């Protein structure tokens, strides 16, 4: 019943953490048919694997040498990359104080050893369903349905957050506003279905061009896209814009009624802010819009700063 939420038909991923290999083997037996089971025998390796593989559920032992389960759970809930992963404690200590402490550090459930396989499985399935539903809803709320890029809502949120981050760290922030050239004519000539497919391909080209960790590509609306480039100055943004122009042209999507080229092209407005000068998110946006207008005025298929 949770199948509909599985990512592209892939199996859910479970991380089992216990310092006793025999316990890991027992849990692996319970889950191996339905899950990808990852294993860790100490806290440090559990945290590393959780960050690297982003499992859907974690089964965590409490008593372990070095980092104990509480410390591991705290570390996971304090890290943005792992904070949404449900952690279920599995421990031999059947004591309500221990259980309460587990919930206090962020666990979602508590199972005592020796465990009954059906009970462990039922608990895991409950939390897995909740987690996958939450992932799905988040994805629906923040992604554009046609291109799969982030949507305008996510863009507005990210613009505020990244602007604040770059101010705090005194680092530059850049924005590319990208608009498909003569797209009305494209639709009129080839039809909306081909138009939609073109937008999907342009979106992929943006992802190819802006792929530094932290770069965020969004569909701003219609045939307009916006790429936020944190920690990137105007020189870096120009290089990225040139790459966008190149990648889109390289798609070689025929556009016989364009005055800019015989293939689909885009125009770009670049805006960069230096954290040392007074500025605001709306100034960044306004400047990118003005620069985009310049690119259109100067003949399209180009970027302006
Ligand atoms: P310019 O070079 O000045 O940007 O000209 P343009 O024709 O691209 O600009 P305009 O804003 O006049 O037209 C944008 C067109 O984009 C009009 C609209 O039909 C089309 N469009 C917007 N969203 C979608 C979409 O989701 N799918 C398709 N197929 N077309 C879309
Ligand atoms: Mg143990
Ligand atoms: Mg437009
Ligand atoms: Mg356009």
Image (cartoon, grey):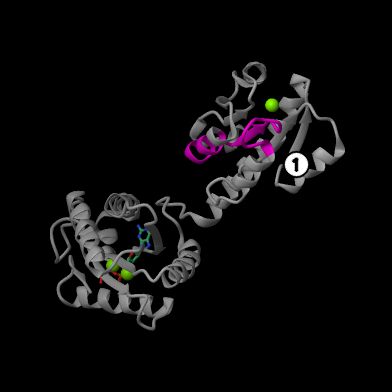
Most foreground residue, 239 or 51? 51
Residue 207 x/y as whole percent:
32, 51
Residue 287 x/y as whole percent:
32, 79
Q: Is residue 48 magenta?
A: yes
Residue 130 x/y as whole percent:
67, 42
Compared across the picture, whether 165 is left or right of 68 comes to left
Residue 181 shows in this picture: no
**Rendering quadrant holding ligand 2:** top right
| Residue located beneath label 1 in the image | 102
Q: Is residue 288 above or below residue 153?
A: below
Compared across the picture, whether 137 is left or right of 276 comes to right
The number of callouts visible is 1
Residue 92 x/y as whole percent:
78, 26
At label 1, counting other C-alpha atoms closer than 10 Å, the crowd grade (few under 14, some 14-19, many 20 or more) is many
Q: Quadrant of residue 179?
A: bottom left
Instruction: Give the residues in magenta.
Output: 46-69
| Residue in view at x 71 percent, y 33 percent | 62
Most foreground residue, 274 or 175? 274
Q: Is residue 261 above or below residue 136?
A: below
| Residue in view at x 71 percent, y 25 percent | 121
Which quarter of the image is occupied by the N terminus? top right
Q: Is residue 174 magenta?
A: no
| Residue in view at x 81 percent, y 39 percent | 99
| Residue in view at x 51 percent, y 30 percent | 10
Residue 250 shows in this picture: yes
Most foreground residue, 19 or 208? 19
């Amino acid at each position: 019943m949770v199948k509909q939420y599985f990512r592209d038909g892939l199996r859910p991923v479970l991380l089992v953490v216990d310092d006793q290999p025999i316990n890991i083997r027992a849990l692996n037996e319970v889950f191996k048919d339905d899950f990808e089971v990852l294993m860790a025998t100490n806290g440090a390796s559990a945290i590393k694997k959780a960050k690297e593989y982003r499992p859907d559920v974690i089964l965590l032992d409490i008593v372990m040498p070095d980092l104990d389960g509480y410390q591991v759970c705290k570390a996971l809930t304090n890290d943005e990359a792992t904070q949404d992963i449900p952690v279920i404690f599995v421990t031999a200590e059947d004591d309500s104080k221990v259980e309460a402490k587990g919930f206090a550090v962020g666990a979602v459930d508590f199972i005592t050893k020796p465990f009954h396989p059906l009970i462990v499985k039922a608990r895991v399935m409950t939390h897995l369903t909740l987690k996958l539903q939450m992932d799905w809803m988040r994805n629906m709320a923040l992604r554009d349905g046609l291109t799969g890029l982030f949507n305008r809502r996510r863009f507005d949120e990210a613009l505020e957050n990244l602007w604040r981050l770059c101010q705090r760290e005194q680092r530059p922030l850049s924005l590319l506003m990208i608009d498909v050239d003569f797209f009305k004519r494209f639709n009129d000539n080839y039809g909306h279905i081909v138009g939609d497919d073109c937008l999907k391909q342009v979106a992929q080209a943006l992802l190819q061009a802006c792929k530094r960790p932290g770069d965020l590509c969004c569909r701003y609306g219609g045939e307009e896209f916006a790429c936020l480039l944190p920690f990137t100055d105007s020189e870096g943004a120009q290089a990225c814009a040139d790459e966008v122009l190149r990648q889109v042209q390289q798609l070689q999507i025929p556009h016989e009624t364009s005055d800019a080229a015989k293939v689909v092209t885009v125009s770009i407005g670049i805006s960069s802010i230096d954290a040392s000068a007074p500025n605001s998110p709306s100034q960044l946006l306004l400047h990118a819009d003005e620069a985009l207008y310049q690119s259109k005025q100067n003949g399209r298929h180009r970027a302006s700063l």
